[in-house]
Image (tube, rainbow, N blue to C red):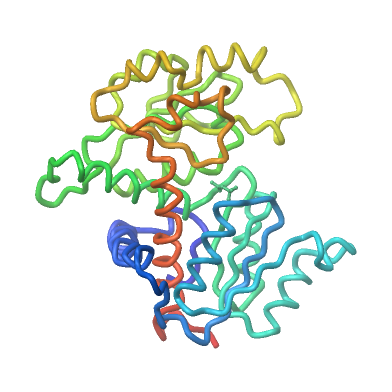
Amino acid sequence: MRHLLSAADLDLATATAVLDLAEEMQQVQSRPVKKLPALRGRTIVNIFFEDSTRTRTSFEIAGKWLSADTINVSAKGSSVSKGESLRDTMMTLDAMGVDAFVIRHSSSGAAAQVAGWVKAQVVNAGDGQHEHPTQALLDAYAMRQHFRTLGAAPAPGATEFAGKRIAIVGDLLHSRVVRSNVLLQRTLGGEVVLVAPPTLLPTGVENWGCEVTGDLDAVLGTCDVVMMLRVQRERMAGGYFPTEREYSERFGLTEERLAALKPGAAICHPGPMNRGVEISSAAADAANSLVLDQVAAGVAVRMSVLYHLLGSDEGAVH
Ligand code: CP
């Protein structure tokens, strides 16, 4: 793997290998000394042009636990705030001998553009409304662990996702998480059901190969995972729905809707959550909520991704 720009970059063998190695990486999390020598001497720059808590911190931890030198750069405090172009900023950092960039940017396609400019390897940590492939991987990891706790082993040759229905609910229009999850589940074999008001459906969603509905209550009891997406107020200029209260009544995972979930169904949310809007506190903190499992998986999965990119001579460019 040269870069990870899209969940579509991952074939079944590679996605499975990333998830399997993440299981080994997760064991490091419970050790008193959280350090492996795998990426000693490698330099990773986490460059974030948009805010982040989970992704930036977990990539930094992942790099450090693999013994890489990790440097964080944000737009504020860098020469970007003086008007330097993205290309000049990235070429400048690349000239310092960086091995990998982990980049988040508000423009869709920014990570792919950067990959065309630099010698270093590039991981897309979220580009606008386009993709967030490591989020989809960590979601898959948390779901797979959950399916395993339910006990039923997959049929020979099938994945744990075969026959599983995953509802992704809410602000699909502005979500990079939904695109990456749809692409990854197409590879892993899960069936994705998209639930949103018509105003929050992306153009062309009918070609994504997923069931699409505006009736959350009709599908709630049929899904093995219900993934609630954040209402992205910062990307909303117009009125996409009348009020947050009405949105919550129709599309929120309210306390009442918890009782309607399929037995054994899990609740996911990539975070950050708007409690009381798309998800109630009762749902976010429920015993079947995987929200913190997703966060924990983020470190292990990102360790695995960094190792797959940088941990072999094949991937090395310097
Ligand atoms: N899920 C996610 O990308 O969270 P952050 O914006 O906090 O990184």
Query: How far across and down, in percent of the image, does residue 304 sit?
Result: 39, 66
Q: Residue furthest front?
A: 32
Image vertical order of residue 296 relative to residue 13, above or below:
above
Q: Residue at position x 53%, y 25% from top?
A: 278
Q: Would you identify the image quadrant in which residue 15 lies? A: bottom left
Q: Quadrant of the N terminus?
A: bottom left
Q: Residue furthest left?
A: 156
With 310 as the anchor, is 100 left or right in this view? right
Q: Quadrant of the C terminus?
A: bottom right
Q: Residue at position x 48%, y 83% from top?
A: 316
Query: How far across and down, in percent of the image, does residue 160 sit?
Result: 22, 45
With 79 as the anchor, is 21 left or right in this view? left
Image vertical order of residue 141 relative to residue 278, above or below:
below
Q: Residue at position x 38%, y 70% from top?
A: 32
Q: Nearer the viewer, residue 274 or 185?
A: 274
With 164 as the anchor, is 212 left or right in this view? right
Q: Nearer the viewer, residue 166 or 248?
A: 248
Q: Nearer the viewer, residue 44 or 87?
A: 44
With 230 as the anchor, is 309 left or right in this view? left
Query: How far across and down, in percent of the image, does residue 97 sit?
Result: 64, 85
Query: How far across and down, in percent of the image, does residue 207 sit?
Result: 45, 33
Image vertical order of residue 34 relative to residue 176, above or below:
below
Q: Residue at position x 67%, y 12% from top?
A: 242
Q: Would you identify the image quadrant in which residue 116 lies? A: bottom right
